[in-house]
Amino acid sequence: MGAPSYASSAIPRPPVTDGGTGVGGRCHSEFMTTQVVLVPGFWLGAWAWDAVAERLRTRGLAAAALTLPGLDGEPSDVGPQDHADAIIAALDQEADRRVLVVHSGAAVPGTMVIDQHPELVDHIVYADTAPVADGFAMNASLSEPTFRLEEVWDEELAGGSMRGLTDEQLATFKERAVPQPGRTVSEPVRLTNPARAQVPATMICTAATAAEYQEFAANGANFLAGLSDYPDLAYVDLPTGHWPMWSMPDELSDLIAGVAQA
């Protein structure tokens, strides 16, 4: 199954001295290390977050973008737990603060992470996605070993989810997309820990507004069924398409940094 691949820029920790500025002489507010783990959705690797990760690093944040197992171009029989394990392994337990950002289908392993290890995440950000409910599967009827972008390309393009992307970005997306491991699409999520809802969470709504997503949930949208478990979830509107890391990297970076530096 392999270990996760990710690009990171760690912020060096200052030496511990005895200067009277706090525990061990370390001024926490000045030298606080905040890690932001960026997880792309279906078909994508760490490269999808390049523009956002660069902007976050200029703000002094330790940004790590993941390529989840099975999405490195090598066929691999992996499921949601393998993806959750990869995210858990990428979270730096030495950091003072850890922010997990999940996009689209990465909400599945992201929700599993805060269910299994809520203590490892100080804030979770859902980028045009939402926490899932127990038993959820993106497509439980999928029987193929992989799910390919080309199967939904025309539908997504016609539906407006690719709004805001340039022709060059669309071409890059199509060229670099890799098959999504089938089990990560068809295998139901198992959630058992209500403490996951106590992890501070923000949903950045791009392809639809916050009000629309809440209306969809009230009308029974399966992917949004988990919203009822999170009464304190914060909603932010960022009008664009479903891939804001490409269409509005500056604005998305500002929102993520605002959460990370709160």
Image (tube, helix red, strand yellow):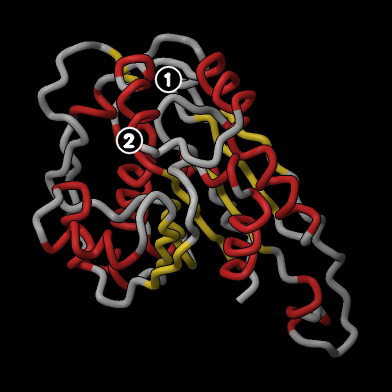
Taking depth in this image into account, of 26 and 202 the one nearest to the observer is 202
- Location of residue 216 with respect to 242 vertically, above or below: below
Taking depth in this image into account, of 158 and 111 the one nearest to the observer is 158
Residue 68 appears at what percent x and percent y?
Answer: 47, 30
Answer few, some or many: residues within 10 Å of disc 1's Cα (few below 14, many 20 plus, some between 14 and 19). many
Residue 185 falls in which quadrant of the image? top left
Residue 23 falls in which quadrant of the image? bottom right
- Location of residue 249 with respect to 19 vertically, above or below: above
Task: Tell how many labels.
Answer: 2
| Residue beneath the point at 80% across and 81% down | 27
| Residue beneath the point at 16% across and 20% down | 142
Residue 169 appears at what percent x and percent y?
Answer: 60, 28
Q: Secondary structure at mark 1?
A: loop
Q: Amino acid at mark 2?
A: Gly
| Residue beneath the point at 46% across and 59% down | 125
* Numbered badge on residue 162: none
Residue with the most extreme front position: 158
Residue 130 appears at what percent x and percent y?
Answer: 32, 54
How far is the residue under mark 1 from the one under mark 2?
28 Å
Taking depth in this image into account, of 108 and 204 the one nearest to the observer is 204
Q: Is residue 256 left or right of residue 68?
A: right
Taking depth in this image into account, of 238 and 48 the one nearest to the observer is 238
Say which label, 1 or 2, has the lower sequence index: 1
Residue carrying label 1: 70
* Numbered badge on residue 159: 2
Q: Amino acid at mark 1?
A: Gly
Residue 230 appears at what percent x and percent y?
Answer: 26, 69
